Image (cartoon, grey):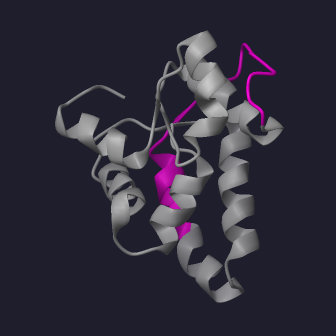
């Protein structure tokens, strides 16, 4: 489960770990998960932060990425578990999918990691685990 900060950086900045996570996503090296709330957040953030021209170029890319995801229905919620209420839907998605959260903002996910056992990785850590063939 890829947090929005990684998607944004991976789609807008050349090189770097976030870009490699997006490349691995496109290559089918892992199965990404997304909830409706997370998909809408991806769109809102990209559309809101990019110029209209750049958003028009990236919108089909985002659509292709989302089509490759398994959509997760949120049956259970563990709120509140993050100091940032905006991250709660990310935790709900990951917990319902049984997935790892890949984020640059690991601090806001530490309580979920400790109390719920939610695996949280930076993009660099996630890429290292991918190279070892760790699932999800």
Image coordinates for residue 15, horizontal then vertical, percent: 34, 71
Image coordinates for residue 97, horizontal then vertical, percent: 54, 22
Residue at 53 percent across and 13 percent down: it is 117
**Front residue of this view, candidates 67 and 87:** 87
Residue 83 in view in this figure: yes
**Front residue of this view, candidates 77 and 5:** 5
Q: Magenta stretch: residue 13 in it?
A: no
Residue at 74 percent across and 29 percent down: it is 82
Q: Is residue 30 above or below residue 116?
A: below
Q: Which residues are magenta?
A: 60-83
Q: Magenta stretch: residue 65 in it?
A: yes
Image coordinates for residue 76, horizontal then vertical, percent: 73, 13
In the picture, which quadrant includes the C terminus? top left
Residue at 62 percent across and 11 percent down: it is 115
Residue 5 figure quarter: bottom right
Q: Is residue 89 above or below residue 118?
A: below
Residue 72 in view in this figure: no
- Furthest toward the bottom, the residue is 53
Residue at 63 percent across and 77 percent down: it is 55
């Amino acid at each position: 489960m890829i947090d929005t900060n990684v998607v944004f950086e991976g789609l807008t900045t050349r090189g770097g770990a976030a870009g490699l996570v997006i490349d691995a996503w496109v290559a089918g090296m892992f199965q990404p998960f997304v909830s409706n709330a997370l998909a809408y957040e991806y769109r809102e953030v990209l559309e809101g932060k990019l110029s209209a021209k750049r958003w028009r170029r990236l919108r089909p890319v985002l659509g292709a990425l989302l089509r490759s995801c398994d959509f997760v229905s949120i049956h259970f919620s563990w709120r509140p578990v993050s100091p940032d209420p905006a991250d709660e839907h990310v935790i709900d998605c990951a917990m319902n999918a049984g997935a790892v959260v890949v984020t640059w903002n690991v601090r806001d996910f530490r309580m979920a990691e400790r109390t719920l056992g939610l695996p949280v990785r930076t993009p660099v850590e996630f890429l290292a685990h991918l190279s070892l063939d760790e699932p999800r």
